[in-house]
Amino acid sequence: MRRSDREVTDIYEILQIIDKAKVLHLGLFDGEYPYVVPLHFGYSYAEEAKRLTFYMHGALEGHKLDLIRQNPQVCVEMECDIELISGGDVPCSYGSTFASVIGKGQAQIVEEEQEKIQGLKLLMKNQTGREFAMDGRMAATVAVIKVSVDEFSAKAKPKRG
């Protein structure tokens, strides 16, 4: 990382960034150009494996699912705490506060009912802060995408003050 002064290495700080973020940008391979989709998500962290697992949902068919089937290697990105830092009358003096996490991993379309239900529960918990009952009938109406991320980094430029 070029700006090591902004690197976040403490896993609990990284998880706080992920908790605050409400949209995950999923980067997929699409021929000559990348394809990036903003998605709501839920996640879990396996401390012993140092693995983040993200769950997203969408339609039962479509371009992103086709791309995952063609090439499951993906990138994820989330950000939060974004606020403009004014530079006054000097345009190049402007900046921004932020915190972000980027990771590389493998995507798969979840077929097993209980894992779909668990992924949807995590998504709802992350998005609303609430626990919801979920059943197989509900899970059958959507596709659930799971992304296992073993390689990730985070950086932040917090607000001064």
Image: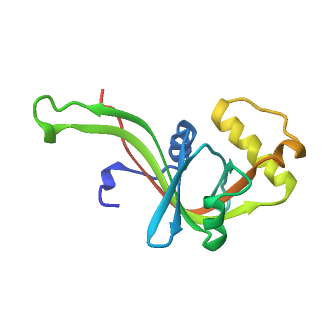
Closer-to-camera residue (103/50): 103
Which one is nearer the viewer's eye here, 51 or 94?
94
Q: Camera-side residue: 62 or 148?
A: 62
Going by the image, does 28 lie left or right of 42?
left
Residue 50 makes an appearance in the image: no
Image quarter where the C terminus lies is top left
Compared to 53, does 15 lie above or below? above
Q: Please report the residue visible at 72 percent of the width from the left and 29 percent of the height from the top.
A: 130
Q: Position of residue 127 (x, y in %)?
A: 64, 35
Which quadrant of the view contains residue 122? top right
Residue extending furthest toward the front = 62
Q: Residue at x 61, y 59 (%)?
A: 64
In the image, residue 5 lies at what x, y percent?
Answer: 31, 51
The quarter of the picture where residue 131 lies is top right
In the foreground, 95 or 91: 91
131 displayed left or right of 82:
right
